[in-house]
Image (cartoon, helix red, strand yellow):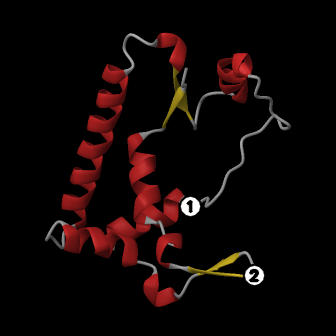
Amino acid sequence: NSKFILNTRNVDNWILSRINFKSYFSTLENNTIIQNEEDKYEYILYYMNKYDTYKIDDIVSIWRNDYHRHIHNVRNYFANRENDFLEFDIEKDSLSKLQNFVIDSGLTFSTNKLPHLNSYSQRNAKDKLDK
């Protein structure tokens, strides 16, 4: 009786978000993420080391392939379980799509808007690619 929600978004925006990801290597102090300026590239450097490459294009290609493979695998797995599966585009879909999917489970929402945590500037992330 489980339900599965696959969050999707534009793959390029997802990749830019990963490039700009900081909090994994940050510390939490008084419920605030503290980020050291020298640590701002730690996340992507971790993956460069993991995949033994120092080219951002290589990492972007790996992440793009991972994204598409994951989406494909999840869609295939739930192909015959339409009532148990929701694909939710976090950039385009309205909250009502999610609400309608979970209503039979007794879940309700106290807001009409999804929270946006760890927001990033795509322009700033893209600038990092260009440097």
Mark 1: few, some, or many residues within 10 Å (few <14, many ≥20)? Answer: few
Q: Which residue appears farthest toward the right when viewing the image? A: 110
Task: From this view, report whether residue 34 is shown above or below residue 100.
Answer: below
Q: Amino acid at mark 2?
A: Asn
Q: Amino acid at mark 1?
A: Ser
**Residue 96 circle label:** none
Q: What percent of the width, then of the height, locates residue 96?
A: 72, 23
Residue 31 lies left or right of residue 47; in this view the side is: right
Q: Nearer the viewer, mark 1 or mark 2?
A: 2
Residue at left offset 29%, top offset 29%: 73
Task: From this view, report whether residue 13 is shown above or below residue 102.
Answer: below
Quadrant the N terminus occupies: top right
Mark 1 element type? loop
Residue at left offset 53%, top offset 88%: 36
- Residue where numbered disc 1 is placed: 121
Residue at left offset 21%, top offset 69%: 50
Mark 2: few, some, or many residues within 10 Å (few <14, many ≥20)? Answer: few
Residue 129 lies left or right of residue 10; in this view the side is: left
Question: Number of callouts in the render?
Answer: 2
Q: What percent of the width, then of the height, locates residue 17?
A: 47, 57
